[in-house]
Image (cartoon, rainbow, N blue to C red):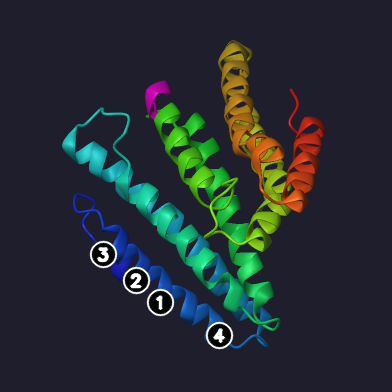
Amino acid sequence: MAFLEDQSPSSPLSLTECLQLWRGFYVALYMHDSKNALSVQKLIAELAGTLRIVDAKDHDSQAASGSDKPGDHPWLDVWMTAFWETVSREWVSIDQWRMNKVLLLVRLAVRELFSLALGWVTDATSDSRTLQSLVASQLEILESWPLSPRERKVPDGLRLHVLDVWVDELAGQLGAAQKAIDEAEQSDSAGDAAAAKKAVLLDTAKAFMTPVEKLTKEALSKGVKVKAKEAVQLAEEKLSR
């Protein structure tokens, strides 16, 4: 973690470097004593928390350079690509005693991603172009890796797990973000602004259902199609105004 934190925001890591780091993190988790549940959970939370580290580096890099280009977020994009590539590669070799650790890592990584994405909406320094670019880049990564309809490098078991946690984590982070807006906007005069932010929050959350909807039509596996349809139905219930 210290190595990642010490990197200069102006010098993003390459995909190869990120893959090497995630490989090291994965081995550390794989070899960690599974009998110490609290220690395992702490390590997994720290690994998922690296998303915030790289997102902050993108933010710091933009602030230092004065760049207003909506596509300037190389840290998070490459980091998430490396994460999903690593999990996809290692998935088939995970034994039954260690699978729960990886399942939790995927869940918490998804949670952190949604927390960051919805946090971009409430960030006063983020404009609509930046938000749209950030979300679009993450959707592209998701559609290329865990929620890809046809990519054979991605095991269906990983797809099914991601779909299993997707809506619950998305709805949970949406609710937390909406609550934060309510607490921040106490005055009546701020009511319109709060309502506008909530509308953008909901639209952003629904955007993350796009790759799931695509799976319902294009997935090669019948099981993945069924699970994707269940996720879409659940989202219709939980993601409402």
- Quarter of the figure that contains the N terminus: bottom left
Q: On the rendered structure, is 237 left or right of 106?
A: right
What separation in Å lies between label 2 and label 4 (alpha carbons)?
Answer: 18 Å
Query: Is there a contact, CB below 8 Å, between mark 3 and mark 2?
Result: no
Q: Name the residue under label 1.
A: 24
Q: On the rendered structure, is 43 left or right of 23?
A: right
Find the magenta span and give its range: 126-130
For numbered disc 2, what is the local secondary structure?
Answer: helix
Front position among marks 4 and 3? 4
Q: Name the residue under label 2.
A: 20
Query: Is there a contact, CB below 8 Å, between mark 4 and mark 1?
Result: no
x 36%, y 70%: residue: 21
Relative to the observer, which residue lies in front, 146 or 184?
Answer: 146
- Amino acid type at mark 2: Gln
Front position among marks 3 and 2? 2
Q: On the rendered structure, is 64 left or right of 18?
A: left
Q: Residues within 10 Å of mark 4 (few under 14, many from 20)?
A: some
For numbered disc 3, what is the local secondary structure?
Answer: helix
Q: Mark 4 points at which residue?
A: 32
> What residue occupies the far front of the structure in this picture?
220
Q: Please report whichever mark, 3 or 1, sits nearer to the chain's N-terminal start.
A: 3
- Quarter of the figure that contains the C terminus: top right
